[in-house]
Amino acid sequence: MSLQDVLAEVAEERARQDAKWGPQNHPDGTGMAYGLSAVPELDVDFAKQRCDAAFARGAGTWEHILYEEFCEAMAEDDPVRLRAELLQTAAVAVHWIEALDRRHASRQLAQQ
């Protein structure tokens, strides 16, 4: 599937969410004000070190990248920087979906 196909699927999923839950206007819940820095699993430095170490030993995965981007977003207080981090997180998630689709297509071709 192309990038446009995946983005269309994302838009369709958003429409389903809107239909199910209605407008969503929650607080961000990120940054120091929410105490996320006290959650070891969301520590940005830990996530970066974990990702870097995995790739350094040749074991890096999409999960490592997405987890790092997610942790970076959760650490942000500033709305502009939070938006940028969420955009990066979304881009990695879309890229991962594209990689899954490519692998699936390759398997289907190999089975023919």
Image (spheres, rainbow, N blue to C red):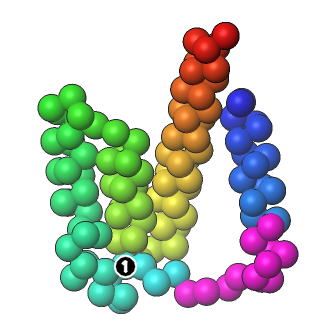
Q: Is residue 72 above or below residue 61?
A: below
Horizontal and vertical percent position of residue 34 = 36, 88
On the question of residue 95 being in view, the answer is no
Residue at coordinates 78% horizontally, 55% vertically from top-left?
Answer: 11
Q: Could you say which quadrant of the image residue 70 lies in?
A: bottom left
Location of residue 100 in the rendering, given as x and y in whole percent from the top left corner:
55, 35
Is residue 52 visible in this depiction of the protein? yes
Q: Nearer the viewer, residue 18 or 31?
A: 18
Asked which secondary structure carries label 1, the reply is: loop
Residue ID at (19%, 60%): 46
Amino acid type shown at disc 1: Gly
52, above or below 34, in the image: above
Residue farthest to the front?
111
Judging by the rendered image, the residue that carries numbered circle 1 is 31
Residue 24, how many percent across, how many down? 70, 82
User: Going 58% across and 18% down the picture, which residue do you hit?
Assistant: 106
Is 108 left, or right, of 13 in this rendering?
Answer: left
Going by the image, does 109 lie left or right of 36?
right
- Quarter of the N terminus within the rendering: top right
Vertical placement of 67 versus 80: above or below?
above
Left or right: 11 as drawn, with respect to 41 = right
Q: Is residue 89 magenta?
A: no
Between 87 and 22, the residue placed more toward the observer is 22
- What residue is drawn where x is 79% and y is 46%? 8
Q: Quadrant of residue 31?
A: bottom left
Mark 1, residues whose alpha carbon is within 10 Å: few (<14), some, or many (≥20)? some
Q: Which residues are magenta?
A: 16-27
Q: Is residue 23 magenta?
A: yes
